[in-house]
Amino acid sequence: MKKFGFLLFLFVIMAALPNGADASSYSAKIYLDGNPLKISSDVKVENISGTVMVPIRVVSENLGYSVKWTKATQKVTVLKDGTTIEMVIGNKTAKINGKSATMTMAPILRGGTTIVPIRFLSENMGHDVKWDNRLKIVHLITRTTGNDGLAAINGISFSDNRLMVAVSGYVNPKVTKLTNPDRIVIDVANAKFSDKFSSSNNLGTGMNGTLTVTGNPDVKQIRYSLFSNSPSTVRIVMDLNRAKNYTLSGTQNGSSVFIVDLNATSTSPAPPPGAGSKKLVVIDAGHGAHDPGAVSSSNRREKDFALALALKVGKLLERENNIDVVLTRSNDTFLELRDRAKIANNLKADAFVSIHANSGPSAASGTETYYERVSSVALANTIHKHMIKATGLKDRGVKYGNFHVIRETTMPAVLLEVGFISNKNDEAKLFNSTFQNRVAESIVVGLKEYLKL
Ligand SMILES: [Zn+2]
Protein backbone atom coordinates (compact mmCIF):
# COMPACT_ATOMS: atom_id res chain seq x y z
CA MET A 1 0.00 0.00 0.00
CA LYS A 2 2.83 2.29 0.82
CA LYS A 3 4.49 1.73 -2.53
CA PHE A 4 1.28 2.27 -4.44
CA GLY A 5 0.69 5.50 -2.59
CA PHE A 6 4.13 6.75 -3.48
CA LEU A 7 3.70 5.93 -7.16
CA LEU A 8 0.37 7.69 -7.22
CA PHE A 9 2.01 10.67 -5.53
CA LEU A 10 4.72 10.79 -8.21
CA PHE A 11 2.14 10.47 -10.94
CA VAL A 12 0.14 13.38 -9.57
CA ILE A 13 3.23 15.58 -9.43
CA MET A 14 4.23 14.71 -12.96
CA ALA A 15 0.72 15.23 -14.23
CA ALA A 16 0.50 18.54 -12.47
CA LEU A 17 3.71 20.06 -13.74
CA PRO A 18 3.76 21.58 -17.17
CA ASN A 19 6.28 20.03 -19.54
CA GLY A 20 9.82 21.12 -18.86
CA ALA A 21 8.76 23.28 -15.94
CA ASP A 22 11.51 24.09 -13.52
CA ALA A 23 10.09 23.39 -10.12
CA SER A 24 11.96 23.96 -6.93
CA SER A 25 10.69 23.94 -3.36
CA TYR A 26 11.95 25.68 -0.28
CA SER A 27 11.07 25.78 3.38
CA ALA A 28 8.35 28.38 3.56
CA LYS A 29 9.46 31.85 4.43
CA ILE A 30 6.59 34.26 4.20
CA TYR A 31 6.75 37.74 5.66
CA LEU A 32 3.60 39.72 6.29
CA ASP A 33 4.30 43.46 6.64
CA GLY A 34 7.91 42.75 7.49
CA ASN A 35 7.22 40.09 10.11
CA PRO A 36 7.86 36.40 9.47
CA LEU A 37 4.73 34.25 9.62
CA LYS A 38 4.96 31.27 11.97
CA ILE A 39 4.66 28.45 9.45
CA SER A 40 5.24 24.81 10.34
CA SER A 41 8.51 23.48 8.95
CA ASP A 42 6.88 20.88 6.71
CA VAL A 43 5.16 23.55 4.62
CA LYS A 44 7.02 24.23 1.39
CA VAL A 45 6.93 27.23 -0.89
CA GLU A 46 7.44 26.23 -4.49
CA ASN A 47 8.47 28.18 -7.51
CA ILE A 48 6.93 26.54 -10.56
CA SER A 49 7.95 28.22 -13.80
CA GLY A 50 8.22 31.53 -12.01
CA THR A 51 4.92 31.27 -10.15
CA VAL A 52 5.24 31.01 -6.38
CA MET A 53 2.83 28.39 -5.07
CA VAL A 54 1.91 27.65 -1.45
CA PRO A 55 -0.33 25.07 0.28
CA ILE A 56 -3.81 26.43 0.89
CA ARG A 57 -3.44 25.95 4.67
CA VAL A 58 -0.95 28.83 4.68
CA VAL A 59 -3.68 30.99 3.23
CA SER A 60 -6.22 29.96 5.86
CA GLU A 61 -4.03 29.47 8.93
CA ASN A 62 -1.43 32.17 8.45
CA LEU A 63 -3.17 34.84 6.43
CA GLY A 64 -6.59 34.40 8.01
CA TYR A 65 -8.58 34.04 4.79
CA SER A 66 -11.54 31.67 4.98
CA VAL A 67 -11.22 28.74 2.63
CA LYS A 68 -13.94 26.40 1.36
CA TRP A 69 -13.27 23.23 -0.61
CA THR A 70 -15.98 21.70 -2.79
CA LYS A 71 -14.82 18.20 -3.65
CA ALA A 72 -17.40 17.42 -6.32
CA THR A 73 -16.41 20.38 -8.50
CA GLN A 74 -12.75 20.55 -7.32
CA LYS A 75 -13.41 24.14 -6.41
CA VAL A 76 -11.54 26.25 -3.84
CA THR A 77 -13.36 29.32 -2.59
CA VAL A 78 -11.37 31.92 -0.66
CA LEU A 79 -13.10 34.75 1.19
CA LYS A 80 -11.87 37.84 2.94
CA ASP A 81 -13.34 41.26 3.68
CA GLY A 82 -16.06 40.99 1.09
CA THR A 83 -13.83 39.60 -1.68
CA THR A 84 -14.53 36.09 -2.98
CA ILE A 85 -12.07 34.26 -5.18
CA GLU A 86 -13.11 30.96 -6.79
CA MET A 87 -10.51 28.67 -8.31
CA VAL A 88 -10.81 25.20 -9.84
CA ILE A 89 -8.00 22.62 -9.75
CA GLY A 90 -6.18 22.54 -13.09
CA ASN A 91 -8.00 25.64 -14.42
CA LYS A 92 -6.12 28.90 -14.98
CA THR A 93 -9.31 30.95 -14.96
CA ALA A 94 -10.43 32.16 -11.55
CA LYS A 95 -13.44 34.23 -10.57
CA ILE A 96 -13.05 37.33 -8.41
CA ASN A 97 -16.46 38.36 -7.09
CA GLY A 98 -17.93 36.57 -10.12
CA LYS A 99 -15.62 38.19 -12.70
CA SER A 100 -13.16 36.04 -14.65
CA ALA A 101 -9.43 36.56 -14.17
CA THR A 102 -6.46 34.57 -15.45
CA MET A 103 -3.82 33.10 -13.19
CA THR A 104 -0.25 32.38 -14.35
CA MET A 105 -0.57 28.89 -12.88
CA ALA A 106 -3.65 26.82 -12.09
CA PRO A 107 -4.15 25.44 -8.56
CA ILE A 108 -2.74 21.94 -8.12
CA LEU A 109 -4.13 19.09 -6.02
CA ARG A 110 -1.35 16.92 -4.71
CA GLY A 111 -1.72 14.17 -2.12
CA GLY A 112 -4.80 15.81 -0.67
CA THR A 113 -3.14 19.24 -0.46
CA THR A 114 -4.25 22.08 -2.66
CA ILE A 115 -1.44 24.34 -3.82
CA VAL A 116 -2.31 27.82 -4.98
CA PRO A 117 -0.55 30.81 -6.57
CA ILE A 118 0.11 33.12 -3.64
CA ARG A 119 0.64 36.30 -5.65
CA PHE A 120 -2.68 36.06 -7.45
CA LEU A 121 -4.57 35.39 -4.23
CA SER A 122 -2.84 37.96 -2.07
CA GLU A 123 -2.88 40.77 -4.61
CA ASN A 124 -6.59 40.37 -5.05
CA MET A 125 -7.04 40.27 -1.27
CA GLY A 126 -5.31 43.62 -0.73
CA HIS A 127 -1.67 42.67 -0.29
CA ASP A 128 1.28 43.62 -2.46
CA VAL A 129 3.49 40.64 -3.13
CA LYS A 130 7.22 40.56 -3.67
CA TRP A 131 9.30 37.42 -4.20
CA ASP A 132 12.88 37.61 -2.98
CA ASN A 133 14.48 34.99 -5.18
CA ARG A 134 17.85 35.16 -3.48
CA LEU A 135 16.56 34.53 0.03
CA LYS A 136 13.47 32.61 -1.19
CA ILE A 137 11.11 34.79 0.81
CA VAL A 138 7.58 35.84 -0.10
CA HIS A 139 6.89 39.35 1.13
CA LEU A 140 3.24 40.29 1.57
CA ILE A 141 2.56 43.92 2.29
CA THR A 142 -0.86 45.05 3.41
CA ARG A 143 -2.29 47.81 1.28
CA THR A 144 -3.73 49.97 3.98
CA THR A 145 -5.76 52.02 1.61
CA GLY A 146 -8.06 49.63 -0.19
CA ASN A 147 -7.08 49.54 -3.81
CA ASP A 148 -5.48 52.93 -4.37
CA GLY A 149 -2.07 51.22 -4.39
CA LEU A 150 -0.50 53.93 -2.23
CA ALA A 151 1.97 53.28 0.52
CA ALA A 152 0.90 54.71 3.87
CA ILE A 153 3.03 56.72 6.27
CA ASN A 154 2.24 55.33 9.74
CA GLY A 155 4.69 57.23 11.89
CA ILE A 156 7.39 59.87 11.80
CA SER A 157 9.83 60.14 14.65
CA PHE A 158 13.20 61.73 15.26
CA SER A 159 15.86 60.73 17.73
CA ASP A 160 19.63 60.64 17.88
CA ASN A 161 19.79 62.68 14.68
CA ARG A 162 17.87 59.99 12.84
CA LEU A 163 14.56 60.57 11.15
CA MET A 164 12.59 57.32 11.20
CA VAL A 165 9.55 56.92 8.99
CA ALA A 166 7.30 53.88 9.45
CA VAL A 167 5.49 52.88 6.25
CA SER A 168 3.27 50.13 4.91
CA GLY A 169 3.89 49.36 1.27
CA TYR A 170 6.88 49.93 -0.95
CA VAL A 171 8.47 53.34 -1.06
CA ASN A 172 11.44 54.82 -2.83
CA PRO A 173 12.14 58.09 -1.01
CA LYS A 174 14.02 60.81 -2.89
CA VAL A 175 16.24 62.79 -0.55
CA THR A 176 17.60 66.20 -1.54
CA LYS A 177 19.96 68.52 0.31
CA LEU A 178 19.10 72.19 -0.13
CA THR A 179 20.74 75.39 1.08
CA ASN A 180 19.60 78.88 1.96
CA PRO A 181 18.13 77.95 4.34
CA ASP A 182 19.81 74.57 4.97
CA ARG A 183 17.32 71.77 4.80
CA ILE A 184 16.88 68.18 3.73
CA VAL A 185 13.80 67.35 1.71
CA ILE A 186 12.44 63.81 1.53
CA ASP A 187 9.80 63.14 -1.11
CA VAL A 188 7.90 59.87 -0.89
CA ALA A 189 5.98 59.37 -4.11
CA ASN A 190 2.92 57.13 -4.34
CA ALA A 191 2.34 57.55 -0.63
CA LYS A 192 -0.11 59.16 1.71
CA PHE A 193 -0.60 59.53 5.45
CA SER A 194 -2.46 56.62 7.02
CA ASP A 195 -5.84 57.54 8.50
CA LYS A 196 -4.53 56.82 11.99
CA PHE A 197 -1.50 59.04 11.45
CA SER A 198 -3.70 61.85 10.12
CA SER A 199 -6.10 61.74 13.04
CA SER A 200 -3.52 61.23 15.80
CA ASN A 201 -1.42 64.11 14.52
CA ASN A 202 -4.36 66.41 13.77
CA LEU A 203 -3.29 66.97 10.18
CA GLY A 204 -6.53 68.72 9.33
CA THR A 205 -7.59 69.67 5.83
CA GLY A 206 -4.16 71.04 4.85
CA MET A 207 -2.71 67.58 5.53
CA ASN A 208 0.40 69.02 7.10
CA GLY A 209 2.04 69.00 10.49
CA THR A 210 5.22 69.66 12.42
CA LEU A 211 7.41 67.54 14.66
CA THR A 212 8.96 69.79 17.27
CA VAL A 213 12.65 69.23 17.89
CA THR A 214 14.13 70.85 20.98
CA GLY A 215 17.72 71.33 21.98
CA ASN A 216 19.21 69.81 18.85
CA PRO A 217 22.15 71.79 17.44
CA ASP A 218 21.56 70.47 13.92
CA VAL A 219 17.83 70.25 13.43
CA LYS A 220 15.38 73.11 13.97
CA GLN A 221 12.18 71.28 13.19
CA ILE A 222 10.63 68.66 10.96
CA ARG A 223 7.65 69.44 8.76
CA TYR A 224 5.54 67.05 6.77
CA SER A 225 2.73 67.44 4.29
CA LEU A 226 0.80 65.80 1.50
CA PHE A 227 2.77 67.73 -1.07
CA SER A 228 1.11 66.64 -4.27
CA ASN A 229 -1.96 64.73 -5.34
CA SER A 230 -0.74 63.56 -8.74
CA PRO A 231 0.98 61.36 -7.94
CA SER A 232 0.12 61.41 -4.26
CA THR A 233 3.40 62.46 -2.62
CA VAL A 234 4.30 62.96 1.02
CA ARG A 235 7.04 65.50 1.62
CA ILE A 236 9.06 65.60 4.83
CA VAL A 237 11.37 68.57 5.38
CA MET A 238 14.09 68.68 8.02
CA ASP A 239 14.84 72.35 8.68
CA LEU A 240 18.50 72.52 9.71
CA ASN A 241 20.51 74.95 11.81
CA ARG A 242 23.56 74.12 9.69
CA ALA A 243 24.35 72.02 6.63
CA LYS A 244 24.39 68.30 7.34
CA ASN A 245 25.13 65.22 5.27
CA TYR A 246 22.80 62.29 5.48
CA THR A 247 22.52 58.61 4.68
CA LEU A 248 19.33 56.85 3.71
CA SER A 249 18.75 53.25 4.79
CA GLY A 250 16.03 50.68 5.21
CA THR A 251 14.14 51.10 1.97
CA GLN A 252 14.77 47.63 0.58
CA ASN A 253 12.64 44.48 0.58
CA GLY A 254 9.64 44.68 2.83
CA SER A 255 11.23 47.13 5.21
CA SER A 256 8.60 49.06 7.03
CA VAL A 257 10.76 51.82 8.31
CA PHE A 258 13.26 54.00 6.48
CA ILE A 259 15.84 56.15 8.16
CA VAL A 260 17.46 59.41 7.14
CA ASP A 261 20.54 59.56 9.33
CA LEU A 262 22.34 62.85 9.92
CA ASN A 263 25.16 61.22 11.86
CA ALA A 264 27.11 60.67 8.65
CA THR A 265 30.33 62.66 8.54
CA SER A 266 30.64 62.35 4.77
CA THR A 267 28.38 61.45 1.89
CA SER A 268 29.76 57.92 1.82
CA PRO A 269 27.14 55.53 3.15
CA ALA A 270 27.36 55.14 6.91
CA PRO A 271 26.88 51.70 8.39
CA PRO A 272 23.30 51.09 9.48
CA PRO A 273 22.64 51.56 13.20
CA GLY A 274 24.04 48.68 15.20
CA ALA A 275 26.42 47.66 12.43
CA GLY A 276 29.87 46.32 13.08
CA SER A 277 30.68 45.53 16.68
CA LYS A 278 28.17 48.02 18.07
CA LYS A 279 25.05 46.72 19.77
CA LEU A 280 21.75 48.31 18.89
CA VAL A 281 19.22 48.95 21.63
CA VAL A 282 15.67 50.14 20.96
CA ILE A 283 14.00 52.04 23.81
CA ASP A 284 10.24 52.27 23.60
CA ALA A 285 8.38 54.89 25.61
CA GLY A 286 4.90 53.43 26.07
CA HIS A 287 1.74 55.18 24.86
CA GLY A 288 1.82 58.76 23.50
CA ALA A 289 -0.31 61.54 22.01
CA HIS A 290 -4.03 60.67 22.32
CA ASP A 291 -3.13 57.53 24.31
CA PRO A 292 -2.15 58.76 27.81
CA GLY A 293 -1.77 55.26 29.29
CA ALA A 294 -2.75 55.15 32.95
CA VAL A 295 -3.68 58.46 34.56
CA SER A 296 -3.12 59.18 38.25
CA SER A 297 -5.68 60.70 40.58
CA SER A 298 -3.80 63.98 40.27
CA ASN A 299 -4.02 63.69 36.48
CA ARG A 300 -0.44 62.79 35.76
CA ARG A 301 -0.09 60.59 32.74
CA GLU A 302 1.87 57.41 32.16
CA LYS A 303 2.88 58.55 28.66
CA ASP A 304 4.78 61.54 30.10
CA PHE A 305 6.63 59.42 32.63
CA ALA A 306 7.50 56.84 29.97
CA LEU A 307 8.84 59.50 27.60
CA ALA A 308 10.86 61.27 30.31
CA LEU A 309 12.53 58.03 31.38
CA ALA A 310 13.08 56.83 27.79
CA LEU A 311 14.79 60.11 26.90
CA LYS A 312 17.06 59.76 29.91
CA VAL A 313 17.94 56.16 29.05
CA GLY A 314 18.54 57.29 25.45
CA LYS A 315 20.89 60.09 26.55
CA LEU A 316 22.92 57.71 28.70
CA LEU A 317 23.15 55.10 25.96
CA GLU A 318 24.31 57.72 23.45
CA ARG A 319 27.42 58.15 25.57
CA GLU A 320 28.28 54.46 25.21
CA ASN A 321 30.82 53.81 22.47
CA ASN A 322 29.65 50.26 21.89
CA ILE A 323 25.93 50.95 21.78
CA ASP A 324 23.69 52.58 19.23
CA VAL A 325 20.29 53.59 20.51
CA VAL A 326 17.03 54.21 18.70
CA LEU A 327 13.96 55.56 20.44
CA THR A 328 10.59 54.53 19.04
CA ARG A 329 9.38 57.97 19.98
CA SER A 330 11.24 60.99 21.32
CA ASN A 331 8.26 63.28 21.73
CA ASP A 332 4.56 63.15 22.45
CA THR A 333 3.64 61.19 19.36
CA PHE A 334 1.60 58.05 18.87
CA LEU A 335 2.80 54.79 17.37
CA GLU A 336 0.85 51.59 16.90
CA LEU A 337 2.21 48.67 18.93
CA ARG A 338 3.07 46.85 15.72
CA ASP A 339 5.12 49.79 14.48
CA ARG A 340 7.11 49.85 17.71
CA ALA A 341 7.97 46.17 17.26
CA LYS A 342 8.69 46.70 13.57
CA ILE A 343 11.21 49.45 14.22
CA ALA A 344 13.20 47.05 16.39
CA ASN A 345 12.73 44.08 14.06
CA ASN A 346 13.68 45.96 10.93
CA LEU A 347 16.74 47.43 12.56
CA LYS A 348 17.67 43.95 13.83
CA ALA A 349 18.15 45.39 17.32
CA ASP A 350 20.02 43.41 19.96
CA ALA A 351 17.65 44.37 22.77
CA PHE A 352 14.28 46.07 23.17
CA VAL A 353 13.08 47.82 26.32
CA SER A 354 9.54 49.15 26.64
CA ILE A 355 8.96 51.61 29.47
CA HIS A 356 5.64 51.82 31.33
CA ALA A 357 4.09 52.64 34.67
CA ASN A 358 1.65 50.30 36.35
CA SER A 359 -1.89 50.93 37.51
CA GLY A 360 -4.13 49.09 39.97
CA PRO A 361 -5.83 49.46 43.35
CA SER A 362 -4.46 52.49 45.19
CA ALA A 363 -2.60 50.27 47.68
CA ALA A 364 -0.73 48.37 44.96
CA SER A 365 2.91 49.38 44.72
CA GLY A 366 6.20 48.16 43.36
CA THR A 367 8.40 47.34 40.39
CA GLU A 368 7.95 44.49 37.94
CA THR A 369 9.58 43.36 34.69
CA TYR A 370 7.86 41.36 31.96
CA TYR A 371 9.12 38.98 29.30
CA GLU A 372 7.04 37.00 26.80
CA ARG A 373 9.59 34.75 25.13
CA VAL A 374 12.09 32.42 26.80
CA SER A 375 14.84 34.22 24.92
CA SER A 376 14.00 37.39 26.86
CA VAL A 377 14.22 35.98 30.39
CA ALA A 378 17.93 36.65 30.87
CA LEU A 379 17.53 40.28 29.78
CA ALA A 380 14.50 40.65 32.10
CA ASN A 381 16.37 39.20 35.09
CA THR A 382 19.44 41.34 34.50
CA ILE A 383 17.61 44.65 34.14
CA HIS A 384 15.21 43.87 36.98
CA LYS A 385 18.04 43.06 39.38
CA HIS A 386 19.48 46.54 38.92
CA MET A 387 16.18 48.36 38.57
CA ILE A 388 14.69 47.26 41.91
CA LYS A 389 17.74 48.64 43.68
CA ALA A 390 17.25 51.94 41.89
CA THR A 391 13.50 52.26 42.52
CA GLY A 392 13.68 51.10 46.14
CA LEU A 393 10.07 50.00 45.72
CA LYS A 394 8.56 46.60 46.48
CA ASP A 395 10.08 43.85 44.31
CA ARG A 396 7.11 42.36 42.45
CA GLY A 397 9.39 40.15 40.41
CA VAL A 398 10.09 39.12 36.83
CA LYS A 399 6.94 37.82 35.18
CA TYR A 400 5.55 36.40 31.98
CA GLY A 401 3.25 38.83 30.17
CA ASN A 402 1.61 38.44 26.79
CA PHE A 403 2.23 42.00 25.60
CA HIS A 404 2.39 42.80 21.91
CA VAL A 405 5.70 44.65 21.82
CA ILE A 406 7.63 41.97 23.70
CA ARG A 407 5.83 39.14 21.87
CA GLU A 408 6.15 40.39 18.30
CA THR A 409 9.73 41.61 18.54
CA THR A 410 12.34 39.13 17.37
CA MET A 411 15.16 40.00 19.80
CA PRO A 412 15.31 39.79 23.62
CA ALA A 413 12.60 42.21 24.72
CA VAL A 414 11.29 43.36 28.08
CA LEU A 415 8.51 45.56 29.35
CA LEU A 416 9.22 47.50 32.53
CA GLU A 417 6.49 48.54 34.95
CA VAL A 418 8.69 50.83 37.00
CA GLY A 419 6.08 51.69 39.65
CA PHE A 420 2.36 52.26 40.16
CA ILE A 421 1.09 55.59 38.91
CA SER A 422 -2.12 54.75 40.80
CA ASN A 423 -0.25 54.72 44.11
CA LYS A 424 0.45 58.09 45.77
CA ASN A 425 3.94 57.18 46.98
CA ASP A 426 5.03 55.48 43.72
CA GLU A 427 3.58 58.31 41.65
CA ALA A 428 5.57 60.98 43.47
CA LYS A 429 8.74 59.02 42.76
CA LEU A 430 7.94 58.26 39.12
CA PHE A 431 7.74 61.96 38.34
CA ASN A 432 10.79 62.87 40.38
CA SER A 433 13.73 63.71 38.15
CA THR A 434 16.39 62.31 40.53
CA PHE A 435 14.47 59.02 40.78
CA GLN A 436 14.21 58.90 36.97
CA ASN A 437 17.97 59.48 36.60
CA ARG A 438 18.69 56.64 39.01
CA VAL A 439 16.30 54.25 37.24
CA ALA A 440 17.65 55.25 33.80
CA GLU A 441 21.16 54.46 34.98
CA SER A 442 20.08 51.09 36.35
CA ILE A 443 18.48 50.17 33.02
CA VAL A 444 21.70 51.07 31.21
CA VAL A 445 23.79 49.08 33.71
CA GLY A 446 21.48 46.09 33.18
CA LEU A 447 21.63 46.40 29.39
CA LYS A 448 25.43 46.64 29.41
CA GLU A 449 25.73 43.64 31.71
CA TYR A 450 23.38 41.63 29.50
CA LEU A 451 25.14 42.69 26.28
CA LYS A 452 28.49 41.90 27.93
CA LEU A 453 29.82 45.42 27.36
ZN1 LIG B 1 1.51 51.24 29.79
Image (cartoon, rainbow, N blue to C red):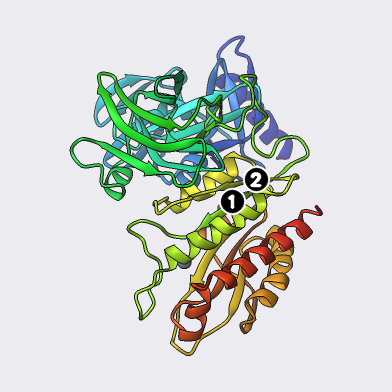
> Dividing the image into 4 quarters, which one contains the N terminus?
top right
Badge 1 is on which residue? 409
Q: Is mark 1 on a helix, strand or loop?
A: loop
Name the spot of residue 53 as percent of width and height, x first.
53, 28
Task: Please give the name of the residue rendered at 50% of the width and 42% of the height, measured from the top-left corner.
Answer: 216
What number of labels is visible?
2
Q: Could you tell me if residue 162 is visible in this image?
A: yes
What residue is at 73 percent from the left and 72 percent from the top?
A: 385
- Report the front residue among 238 and 396: 238
Q: Which of 431 and 452 is in front in this view?
A: 431
Residue 92 drawn above or below residue 19: below
Q: In which quarter of the image is residue 270?
A: top right
| Residues marked 1 and 2 touching at CB (< 8 Å) | yes
Q: Can you tell which of label 1 and label 2 is closer to the viewer?
A: 2
- What whole-number distance in Å separates the C-alpha atoms at marks 1 and 2? 9 Å
Callout 2 environment at 10 Å: few (<14), some (14 to 19), or many (20+)? Answer: many
The numbered mark, 1 or 2, whose residue comes first in the sequence reads 2
Task: Classify 62 as above or below 382.
Answer: above
Q: Is mark 2 on a helix, strand or loop?
A: loop
Viewer-closest of 340 and 72: 340
The label number, if any, that marks residue 349 in the structure image: 2
Q: Where is residue 120 in the image (x, y as percent from the top left)?
A: 41, 26
Which residue is drawn at the image coordinates 28% and 43% (left, top)? 198
The image quadrant that residue 94 belongs to is: top left
Residue appearing at x 29%, y 37% in the figure: 83
Q: Position of residue 241 (x, y in %)?
A: 46, 32
The residue sitting at the left extreme is 205
Q: Which amino acid does label 2 sit on?
A: Ala
Instruction: Specify whether 29 is left or right of 422.
Output: right
